[in-house]
Amino acid sequence: MSSLLTNGVLQQHWAVPLAVHTFDQATDVNAVLARVFAIMRATDTDAEKSNGGFYASADDLLQRVDLPEFRLLVEFIAKAVQMTAKQANAGVWPPGRHGLQLELVGLWFQIQNGAAFHDIHTHGNCSWSGVYYVQIDAPQFRHAHPEWGPLNGATRFYSPMFPLLGGAHMDMGNAYMQQATLDFLPQEGQLVVFPAFLPHKAMPYAGDKDRIIVSFNAQIRAPGGDQIYRYAGA
């Protein structure tokens, strides 16, 4: 794919798409899922999945959980990813209908409290990932934390240029690169969708409620093959 650069006109390229969606049935659904996930954690015999105040389930919830509330959440996630991907690929996907198919190739929950955190990571084997916030203290309580303030329980995203900052020469000419992180301050019922390559971190959290999230990996496939542009060379 090529794009002409216009003389004298600044163009911005390689932006990172992120989107936030709010689940309008979150109040009822979240209460049920929080109880179910707590039971699943308590009955999990794999001690390695639980580390102090942090717990992560296996990524097979689609096969293990069969509840109306869970199906509503999965439908919401699928629609949100479809909308986000369509917007991100506007002008890139070929025109017409191609029978694109979305598949959630992994879906799991995590429980966090007591200053636990999930360090910087990316997600593989997919194009999109996301975090849905099932349960977390209200902002006014989280933000009152004496050390972390508003960052208590936040999700931090790292610029793709972040690895370049350590060895790059910094001056006023590339000040636009200095915003190396973006902190998302979540609320219950929110879903943030982002490209799977984007590094992110669950910041330390301490609260009256456990911080409970659902994460997922998603692929969008074309039945006839995913190639958009002809391959060049051997």
Image (tube, helix red, strand yellow):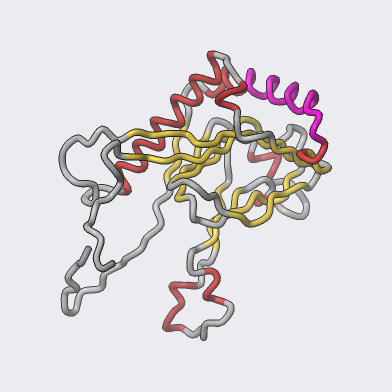
Examine the rendered structure and indicate whether residue 12 appears above or below residue 191. Answer: below
Asked whether residue 150 appears in the rendered view, the answer is no
Is residue 196 rendered to the left or right of residue 115?
A: left
Examine the rendered structure and indicate whether residue 80 appears above or below residue 182. Answer: above
Which is more toward the observer, 123 or 173?
A: 123
Examine the rendered structure and indicate whether residue 16 appears above or below residue 47. Answer: below
Residue 170 pos. (x, y %): 51, 83
List the single residue furthest toward the top: 68
Residue 31: quadrant of the picture: top right
Residue 187 pos. (x, y %): 58, 37
Examine the rendered structure and indicate whether residue 233 appears above or below residue 44. Answer: below
Is residue 229 rendered to the left or right of residue 167?
A: left
Q: Residue at x 36, y 41 (%)?
A: 84
Which is more toward the observer, 136 or 48?
A: 48
Is residue 71 rendered to the left or right of residue 99?
A: right
Residue 203 pos. (x, y %): 67, 51
How many numbered markers are drawn? 0
- Majority secondary structure in the magenta region: helix
Q: Residue at x 22, y 58 (%)?
A: 230
Quadrant where the image shows the C terminus: bottom left
Q: Residue at x 76, y 43 (%)?
A: 206
List the single residue furthest toward the front: 234
**In the image, residue 34 lies in the stretch drawn in magenta:** yes
Tell me which segment is drawn in magenta.
31-46
